[in-house]
Every structure is written in structure tokens, then in C-alpha cells.
Image (cartoon, grey):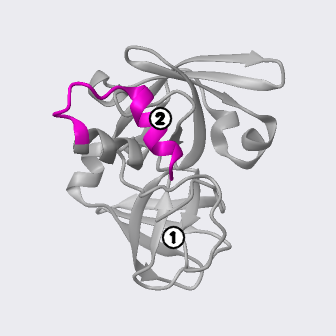
Amino acid sequence: MFTGLIREFAQVIRYENNLLTLSSHYKPAMGDSIAINGVCLTVVHIAENTFSVELSLETRKLIAIENLKGRVHMEPALSLGDKLDGHMVQGHVDCIGEIISLKQQGNGLDIIVRIPEDFITFVIPKGSIAIDGVSLTVNEVGQNEFRLTIIPHTLEQTLIKEYNVGRRLNIETDMFARYIYHMFKKDKALDWSSVDRILASY
């Protein structure tokens, strides 16, 4: 489990034979779970200055694999007793999104992201979403896109400041929204106002 708060930027050393090798100040242990660009991966090899994680076929099919180069977002898994900021992130990517608009708005940067329409159901206005592992708040939801406003602090602490229109992103929707939807999907009376009330009780 993760929080969507980026610990540091790790540097990709190489990606070959489904093994991603990275260097970072943080030193994981063998078998640790670690999120790279929002993807929960397991440490399978440790060297003096690097560590490697393995990507399964399922993972490779679901993520924006072309972004596994240069610097990447990294967050170690939560430990018992860690402070919980951001929101509960599993590191299980739902789909790939694409940036279709970037626009400066006052001191913030508005980003509009398009995702497959099947997944927009799980994106809630003023709810949480993880973009490449970064915990963010959704401002507005359309038919197959949503709008985020990124504050300067977040831009400084993440790679989002380097993103361009057309970039593909790893998207993880809010797990509570997914759970509640699947619990009540046969109840035609359920709407997102009801879901908001349920989420507010957590």
C-alpha cells in the first residue's frame, strides 16, 4: 500500500529482459514492494548501487512502459506506523491516460487527461486519483476526461512539471470508488451523490 506522495526520483539504469534496474538514495531490501511511476513492483535483485524489479506480462500490458527511462517517480510501500498523507494507493494501474491539455491558471497548472470511457465511472469530482503514482484531487469530470489543478509545490516535488500534451500516464482510480461501485452496481438507484456520502464516512 502507498500514499501517492513521491519519496524521490529514481534513475533508470536499464530496462531489459523484463527487469528494470534503478539507482536511488533509498535502499530497498530483497522482496520489498516499491512503486515506480505508480506501479507496485517487487525488488528481485540488489547490487552495490542499484536494485532491480521485475515486470510481469500483465503489468507490461497495462502501463505506459515507454516512460521507464531517465528519472521516474518512486515511493516505498507504507510501513506500520507511517504517517498517512495523500490517499490510499494500491499501485495497481487501471488504465493509461493521455494528456490532452496543459494550461497555466493563476499559480496552478490545469491538466486535462483523457482515459477510456469505461474507467471514467470511477473518477469522482473532488475525489482522489493517482497519476504516475502522484496523489491528486480531481476538479472536474467529463464524458471521458477529467481536469486536475497542480499547485507549485506538487510541480516542484514531481516530474509533472516536465510533462507535455500527448504524454501517456499510469492511472489508478480511487479504490473506494471502485469497491463501492462494484458493491452496488446492481442497484440502479445508486448515484455518485450517494457514493460521495458513503466515502465521506471513511
Residue at the (72%, 24%) spot, across then down: 109
Whether residue 131 appears in this view of the structure is: no
Q: Are marks 1 and 2 in contact (CB under 8 Å)?
A: no
In reply to whether residue 189 is colored magenta, the answer given is: yes
Q: Is residue 65 magenta?
A: no
The relative height of residue 178 versus residue 23 in the rendered view (above or below) is above
Q: Is residue 39 above or below residue 105?
A: below
- For the residue labelled by badge 1, is the local secondary structure a helix, a strand or a loop? loop
What's the residue type where badge 1 is placed?
Ala
Report the residue marked by disc 2: 196
Front-most of 159 and 13?
Answer: 159
Q: Quadrant of residue 31?
A: bottom left
Q: Is residue 56 left or right of residue 171?
A: left
In the image, 189 versus 109, the foreground residue is: 189
Q: Nearer the viewer, residue 189 or 12?
A: 189
Q: Secondary structure at mark 2?
A: helix
Q: Is residue 141 visible?
A: yes
**Does 181 sit left or right of 149 as displayed?**
left
108 sits to left or right of 69: right
Eye-nearest disc, 1 or 2: 2
Q: Which residues are magenta?
A: 184-202
Residue 15 percent coordinates (x, y): 40, 59
Near mark 1 (Cα within 10 A), the count class, few <14, some 14-19 or many ≥20, is some
Residue that badge 1 annotates: 77
Q: Residue 104: give x, y in percent of width and height.
A: 75, 18
Kind of residue indicated by mark 2: Asp
Residue in view at x 40 percent, y 48 percent: 176
